[in-house]
Image (cartoon, grey):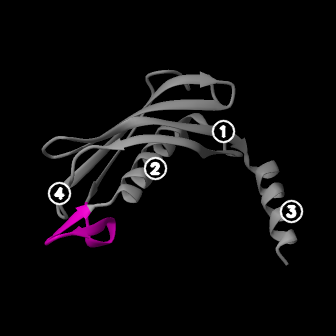
Amino acid sequence: MTSTLEPGVQGVLERTVAAEHCTRRGEYDIFSTPNLVLLLEEAAIEGLAPHLRDDQASVGSKVDIAHIAPTLRGQTVRATATVTEVDRRRVLFDIRVEDDKELIGQGTHERFVVDLPSFEDRLAAKAGQLQ
């Protein structure tokens, strides 16, 4: 992790809501909560990426989100993940997700920075236990 990772760093992602991002309610296809969570995680990852070494990545550990308004298929959604706290390898984000009309989701997201070689060793050991 570089010293440039500090509160205020942001990751922003936009997506046009397609059928695969939706659940059906009545006669409408609406943006699903699992896809809202995926978008906010991807925004946080995007914000962290320039501040990590090549041998590092991040993993999500907590999501606390309120999905407060529906979004229809075809609308654009924008997730903004803003770093609010950095504590060693723990990074906390404030999350806002908006469509082209209103705020649709807000909350917090926590990620941990991991060293890829040791993380991959843990995954390999776990995969070996499955065989």
Q: Is residue 66 above or below residue 31?
A: above
Q: Which mark is residue 75?
A: 4
Q: Mark 3 or mark 2, which is nearer the start of the sequence?
A: 2
Distance of label 3 from label 1 (alpha carbons) = 20 Å
Residue 12 lies, in percent from the top left, at 36, 41
* Lateral position of residue 126 relative to residue 25, left or right: right
Question: Which range of residues does the magenta coloring cover?
Answer: 17-30
Is residue 34 shown in magenta?
A: no
The image's mark for residue 113 is: 1
Q: Residue furthest bottom?
A: 131
Query: Of callouts 4 and 1, which one flags the residue occurring earlier in the amino acid sequence?
Result: 4
Query: How would you rate the neighbour count of disc 1 (Cα within 10 Å): few for under 14, some for 14-19, many for 20 or more?
Result: some
Q: Which kind of residue does numbered mark 2 sit on?
A: Glu
Between 7 and 66, which is closer to the camera in this rendering? 66
Is 20 on the left or on the right of 40, as rendered? left
Q: Earlier in the sequence, mark 2 or mark 1?
A: 2
Q: CA distance from mark 4 to mark 3?
A: 43 Å
Task: Indicate which disc, 4 or 3, sits on the residue closer to the N terminus.
Answer: 4
Earlier sequence position, callout 4 versus callout 2: 2
Q: Which of the labelled discs sits on residue 42, or is there none? A: 2
**Type of amino acid under label 1:** Val
- Residues under labels 4 and 2: Cα distance? 19 Å
Q: Is residue 28 magenta?
A: yes
* Quadrant location, the C terminus: bottom right
Identify the residue position indicated by label 3 in the image.
125
Q: Amino acid at mark 3?
A: Ala
* Residue 20: % across, % down: 33, 71
- For residue 15, what is the image quadrant? bottom left
